[in-house]
Image (cartoon, helix red, strand yellow):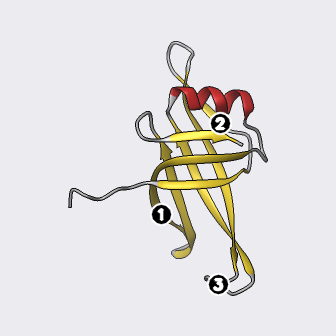
């Protein structure tokens, strides 16, 4: 199927200060952080009237977004991001403990805005 689009749009809060990878010449090449999102379950799962949390592991390689993350993002910062998504299960002791969405912000067709 060539018409498939893998795109995720999230608004949430960074849960801890971003970690950076540095290239050989000293410039930042990637940033990694956890993003927490919430939604109100008034008419959706898991239960009516309950708030649910979503945890997303974000990896950013887009140069201008890296500068914004370095200068303006700390724990608690609210961000809007567009990226590619991949879900993975968290398994401990042979039991599935939950699902985490990995989000990649790449140089093309992805973005991050600090709110």
Q: Relative to residue 46, is residue 101 drawn left or right?
A: left
Q: Which residue is situated farthest in the left direction here?
A: 1
Indicate which disc, 1 or 2, sits on the residue closer to the N terminus: 2
Indicate which disc, 1 or 3, sits on the residue closer to the N terminus: 3
Q: In the rendered image, which residue does mark 3 sit on?
A: 43
Mark 1 or mark 3, whichever is nearer to me: 3
* Mark 2 residue crowding within 10 angstroms, few (<14) / some (14–19) / many (20+): few
Indicate which disc, 2 or 3, sits on the residue closer to the N terminus: 2
Residue 88: mark in rendering: 1
| Tag 3 secondary structure | loop
* Mark 3 residue crowding within 10 angstroms, few (<14) / some (14–19) / many (20+): few
Q: In the rendered image, which residue does mark 2 sit on?
A: 19
**Quadrant of the image occupied by residue 51:** bottom right
* Mark 1 residue crowding within 10 angstroms, few (<14) / some (14–19) / many (20+): few
Please identify the quadrant where the N terminus is shown. bottom left
Q: Is residue 42 above or below residue 27?
A: below
Residue 76 % position (x, y): 79, 47
Residue in view at x 25 percent, y 58 percent: 3
Looking at this view, is 108 or 69 the one in front?
A: 108
Q: Is residue 47 above or below residue 110?
A: below
Q: Relative to residue 115, is residue 45 drawn left or right?
A: left
């Amino acid at each position: 199927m060539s018409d498939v689009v893998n795109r995720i749009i999230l608004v949430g809060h960074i849960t801890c200060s971003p970690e950076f990878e540095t290239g050989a010449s000293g410039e930042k090449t990637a940033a990694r952080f956890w993003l927490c999102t919430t939604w109100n379950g008034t008419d959706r799962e898991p239960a009516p009237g309950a708030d649910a949390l979503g945890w997303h592991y974000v990896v950013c390689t887009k140069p201008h977004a890296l500068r914004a993350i370095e200068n303006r993002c700390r724990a608690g910062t609210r961000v809007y991001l567009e990226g590619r998504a991949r879900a993975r299960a968290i398994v401990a002791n042979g039991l599935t403990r939950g699902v985490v969405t990995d989000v990649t912000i790449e140089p093309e067709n992805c973005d991050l805005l600090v709110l």
